[in-house]
Image: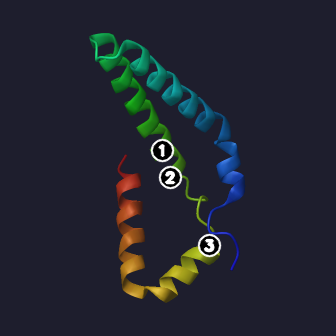
Amino acid sequence: MKEDLNQDVLLRSWAIIIVVIALEIGLALYKLLKGQWTKKMASFNTIFELFATVVFIVILSNPNLINQEFITYMSKLFPKQFEIWIEIVCIYFNNL
């Protein structure tokens, strides 16, 4: 079976993923140095988590992320369950 995820789609998202990782490391180091939560740290953490969530949703909402062969394989393996899951995901992301 071919790769499950479309490598080209993931490579296009590489730069933003590096930014998210760098921000996460920076936030972890800031927390380590401060030693306690502050309003500034809580604000930055909230903004970062919202940003990371949006990035994650944008990457996952790309219809070309999963190869068609993988979808066909999974639908044969789990006929009804996979079909329901695909419908739920499509409805959710179409309503964003």
Nearest the eye: 57 or 25: 25
**Relative to 89, is 62 above or below?**
above
Q: CA distance from mark 2 to mark 3?
A: 15 Å
Rate crowding at label 1 as few (under 14), some (14 to 19) or many (20 or more) other CA atoms within 10 Å: some
Under mark 3, the amino acid is Gln
Per the rendering, the mark at residue 56 is: 1
**Mark 3 = which residue?**
68
Quadrant housing residue 45:
top left
- At mark 2, the secondary structure is helix
The percent coordinates of residue 8 (x first, y second) are: 72, 53
Under mark 2, the amino acid is Leu
Q: CA distance from mark 1 to mark 2?
A: 6 Å
Q: Nearer the viewer, mark 1 or mark 3?
A: 1
Q: Residue at x 50, y 39 (%)?
A: 55
**Mark 2 = which residue?**
60
Q: CA distance from mark 1 to mark 3?
A: 21 Å
Earlier sequence position, callout 1 versus callout 3: 1
Left or right of 41 in this view: 58: right
